[in-house]
Image: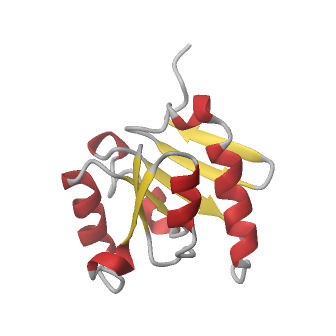
Amino acid sequence: MQFLIDADLPRTLVSLFASFGHDAIDVRDIGMGASLDDAIAQYAAEHHLCLITGDWGFADIRTYPPEQLFGIIIIGLPDGARGSQIIELVELLLNLPEILAMVPGRLAIVEKGRIRLRPPARE
């Protein structure tokens, strides 16, 4: 998979994704570090990138329908979380390729102790 990393997450995620065989672009490396959410979502959609962010605004599926994107991953941590905590959650997801494979076209919320996929998988 290919990912677009939002500016609220550590840059070191680029190398973490690479270590798991995925391509990742940090918005700051393409001049979008201060871009509005709509522009970031549009870039991700146009380039078939799964957006990974800590910005809960992207969880509003009425504004950012995940089926129109290659997936949105929200890293859910309390304000002031350290970079190491974020990396730990992302690594948890990357170690679950069967879950990661279900993300395209969906919203995934990764929090300590759980990963939620919206909409839920059909039985």
* Looking at the image, residue 115 lies above or below residue 76: above
Seen from this angle, which residue lies furthest top?
123
The quarter of the picture where residue 4 lies is bottom left
| Residue under the image location 37 percent in, 80 percent down | 28
Residue 69 in the image: x percent, y percent?
31, 47
| Residue under the image location 59 percent in, 34 percent down | 97
From the viewer's side, name the closer residue of 115 and 9: 9
Residue 25 in the image: x percent, y percent?
38, 65
Residue 95 in the image: x percent, y percent?
68, 41
From the viewer's side, name the closer residue of 112 and 82: 82
| Residue under the image location 52 percent in, 75 percent down | 11
Judged left or right of residue 107, residue 61 is left
From the viewer's side, name the closer residue of 65 and 91: 91
Judged left or right of residue 104, residue 14 is right
Residue 40 in the image: x percent, y percent?
30, 68
The N terminus, quarter of image: top left
The C terminus, quarter of image: top right
The quarter of the picture where residue 42 lies is bottom left
* Looking at the image, residue 83 lies above or below residue 43: below
From the viewer's side, name the closer residue of 60 and 5: 5
Seen from this angle, which residue lies furthest right?
113
Judged left or right of residue 17, residue 114 is right
The quarter of the picture where residue 63 lies is bottom left
How many numbered marks, from 0 up?
0
| Residue under the image location 71 percent in, 48 percent down | 92
Image coloring type: secondary structure
